[in-house]
């Protein structure tokens, strides 16, 4: 009996030591501290961290993407009203406003109960833990992942796929996932994968590898595609931001040549490049 007690005592001490290395359950954050949060999983410590100063970009600041704004705003309004709404995948050219559009939604609808949780791609495996933290809250949560893409075999790929549509546990109705990506199907696609594509009675049957890659993006109910700006669209965005940054209206037309040169040097005409130029140009008018 004495030997048994000694064994149990040693086992208990060993378990206490092991517990130090096990990840602790994430504690609920101070929900009143912010409208935006970041999920952090570092050194076995998981937490929702409030963002003290969420981005203040407005929907009106996003120019020449009116149709895209209307679609995602309508989906978000349905979500906030407790109606059926879709997970959203925003894809396309860099710098065209994909992530800014999601941030602007928070600025527009935070007063209606919308909350934004930013989740890094590497932390998507923790999605079930995040859902568990928020599922009983009265607010409506968008889980936001920016610049999403996967390589073959990444565990986060299957975690996201399962949460979107494939797990036995249903996602609560106060949670949606909005993601941005430069890749429409979120994974690299290779010409060799098409070699196994079959044509049967006039129907195309994609190869198994292709089907697997398409299956994740298809779990997003709403796709919104972004394209490079034309010169006129780029200049319209430049003019908007110059006005927002305090450049006198009479001075804005004189910036046209510099704005085009800036885009040429950057090799891109996008909303991001327009905003960066406007900041630089407006700085010359500041005393």
Image (cartoon, grey):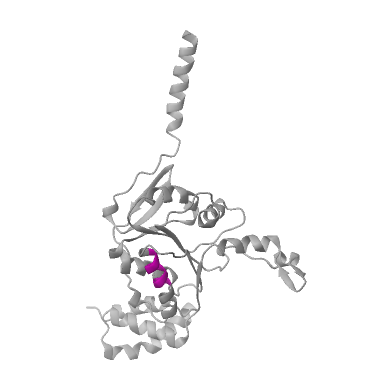
Residue 35 in the image, given as x and y percentages of width and height: 31, 59
Residue 145 visible somewhere in the drawing: no
Quarter in which the C terminus is drawn: bottom left
Residue 186 in the image, given as x and y percentages of width and height: 56, 63
Q: Tell whether position 73 is magenta.
A: yes
Horizontally, residue 206 falls left or right of residue 103, namely right
Q: Quadrant of residue 21?
A: top left
Residue found farthest to the top:
1
Residue found farthest to the front:
83
Q: Which residues are magenta?
A: 72-79
Examine the rendered structure and indicate whether residue 66 appears above or below residue 14.
below
- Residue, x 38% and y 82% (percent of image)? 237
Please tell me which residue lies in front, 154 or 176.
176
Residue 228 visible somewhere in the drawing: yes
Q: Tell whether position 34 is magenta.
A: no
| Tag count | 0
């Amino acid at each position: 009996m004495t030997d048994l007690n000694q064994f149990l005592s040693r086992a208990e001490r060993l378990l206490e030591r092991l517990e130090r290395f096990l990840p602790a359950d994430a504690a609920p954050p101070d929900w009143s501290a912010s409208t935006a949060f970041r999920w952090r999983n570092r050194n076995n410590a998981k937490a929702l961290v409030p963002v003290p100063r969420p981005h203040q970009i407005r929907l009106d600041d996003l120019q020449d993407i009116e149709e895209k704004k209307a679609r995602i705003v309508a989906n978000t309004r349905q979500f906030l009203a407790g109606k059926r709404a879709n997970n959203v995948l925003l894809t396309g050219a860099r710098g065209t406003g994909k992530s800014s559009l999601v941030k602007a939604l928070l600025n527009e609808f935070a007063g209606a109960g919308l909350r934004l949780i930013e989740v890094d791609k590497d932390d998507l495996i923790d999605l079930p833990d995040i859902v568990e933290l928020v599922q009983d809250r009265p607010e409506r949560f968008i889980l936001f992942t920016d610049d999403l893409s996967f390589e073959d075999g990444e565990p986060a790929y299957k975690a996201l796929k399962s949460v979107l549509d494939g797990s036995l546990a249903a996602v609560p109705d106060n949670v949606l996932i909005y993601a941005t990506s430069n890749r429409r199907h979120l994974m690299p696609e290779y010409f060799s994968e098409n070699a196994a594509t079959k044509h049967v009675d006039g129907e195309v049957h994609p190869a198994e590898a292709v089907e697997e890659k398409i299956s994740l993006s298809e779990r997003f109910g709403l796709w919104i595609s972004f394209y490079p700006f034309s010169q006129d669209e780029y200049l319209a965005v430049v003019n908007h931001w110059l006005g927002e940054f305090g450049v006198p209206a009479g001075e804005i037309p004189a910036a046209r040549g510099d704005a085009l040169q800036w885009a040429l040097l950057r090799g891109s005409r996008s909303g991001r490049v327009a905003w960066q130029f406007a900041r630089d140009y407006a700085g010359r008018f500041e005393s």
